[in-house]
Amino acid sequence: GDRVLCDFVRRYTAEPDWVDWSEIRRGQRVFVRNLPICGLTLFYLSLVGGFSAPLITKVLRATGYLTSAPKRVMRRLADTGHMICECLVPGSLRPEVRGEGWKAVLRVRFLHGMVRRRLHDKPYWKPELWGVPVNQEDMMATLLAFSYNVLVGSEMVLGRPLSDEVCVRARVCRRVCIKVGAKKCARECVCSCTVRVRPAAVVGQLQHTNTEPAAPSHT
């Protein structure tokens, strides 16, 4: 057990070659500068859209994310918002200092692992129809909704494109994707710097699918 934990920490304290902390800091400033707009977009565009995705709602319903007592639901929503805020603090995503954002994202990853194991053992969960709970497909849709949808929503409210702010936002999202384990989403976040049609199509397809899960849903 200790060896597994040590390997896990070692893997997620290693820095990819592409990390540019000055760009990540710029991306954090973009979010903070537009925080009221980003908050509205997250709750009314990203979360509502995500909670409407048929396959994702299977997990939400099974874990009681939105069907528990009102106070518990509000606590869970607040926890999600708190995790985002922790990721926006300067230096918070740096693993060498065990930043609060870094720890918050890894806690989410541990939570996802617990949900996967719990639902896998439940007789009512149908993996042949619904795939693995909180799989790559689910995380791809969610993290793109938290990055691309926030971008689109902010531009709708502001009435203007954010131009160069797009790329630095995507870099922050890519950093979170790597830590939470969404490998495919990390690539899509890079694409969102230069190509908007592709992530838009990915978000739309993933959020509205109600057929047999695609290959990423089995991982």
Image (cartoon, rainbow, N blue to C red):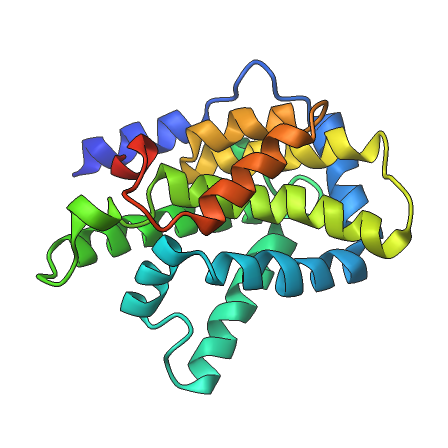
Depth order, front residue of 196/193: 196
Q: Is residue 34 left or right of residue 71?
A: right
The quadrant in which residue 191 appears is top right
Q: Quadrant location of the N terminus? A: top left
Whether 4 is drawn above or below 17: the answer is below
x, y percent for residue 140? 47, 39
Would you say residue 163 is visible in this rendering?
yes
Whether 197 is drawn above or below 110: the answer is above
Residue at the (69%, 31%) spot, across then down: 196
Q: Is residue 218 left or right of residue 60?
A: left
Q: Is residue 211 left or right of residue 143?
A: left
The quadrant in which residue 157 appears is bottom right
Whether 75 is drawn above or below 139: the answer is below
x, y percent for residue 198? 61, 29
Q: Quadrant location of the C terminus? A: top left
Depth order, front residue of 181/14: 181
Residue at the (38%, 78%) spot, across then down: 67
x, y percent for residue 42? 65, 58
x, y percent for residue 215? 29, 31
Q: Is residue 59 left or right of residue 85?
A: left
Residue at the (72%, 22%) spot, across then down: 194
Would you say residue 99 is visible in this rendering?
no
